[in-house]
């Protein structure tokens, strides 16, 4: 199953936010499943790896900060039309 590959991609999504491109790749290898998050800004890339066992906790943390941002009101610098 793993011959010739280090890991394999199960799913991939990209999100463009302003000048940043975020790539979310769900991958797996013989050691387990993980999420690779890559931020690309003008060719400079930074990547973090999150074990699949932590994805629910990451989602909970994201939900909490999204809620806090919404409750804080308009973001400084947002253009009003």
Image (cartoon, rainbow, N blue to C red):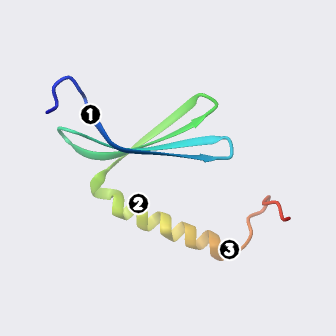
Residue 24 % position (x, y): 44, 45
Quadrant in which the C terminus is drawn: bottom right
Q: Which residue is mark 1?
A: 7
15, 77: nearer the viewer: 15
Q: Which residue is mark 2?
A: 58
Q: Which residue is mark 3?
A: 72
Which of these two is toward me, 45 or 13?
A: 13
State the image quarter where residue 25 is shown: top left
Residue 37 placement, left or right of 55: right
Contact between marks 3 and 1 (CB within 8 A): the answer is no
In the current view of this chain or complex, which residue is farthest to the right?
81
Q: Residue at x 64, y 30 (%)?
A: 42
Decide: is 18 above or below 2: below
Q: Residue at x 49, y 68 (%)?
A: 63
Query: Closer to the N terminus: mark 2 or mark 1?
Result: 1
Of badges 2 and 1, the one in the foreground is: 1
Does label 3 or label 1 sit earlier along the sequence?
Answer: 1
**Callout 2 secondary element:** helix
| Circle 3 SS class | loop
For label 1, the SS is loop
Q: CA distance from mark 3 to mark 1?
A: 41 Å
Marks 3, 1: nearer the viewer: 1
């Amino acid at each position: 199953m793993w011959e010739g590959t280090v890991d394999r991609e199960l799913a991939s999504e990209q999100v463009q936010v302003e000048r940043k491109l975020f790539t979310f790749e769900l991958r797996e290898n013989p050691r387990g499943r993980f999420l690779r998050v890559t931020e690309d800004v003008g060719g400079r890339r930074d990547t973090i790896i999150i074990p699949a066992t932590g994805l629910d906790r990451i989602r909970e943390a994201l939900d909490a900060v999204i809620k806090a941002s919404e409750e804080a009101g308009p973001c400084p610098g947002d253009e009003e039309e």
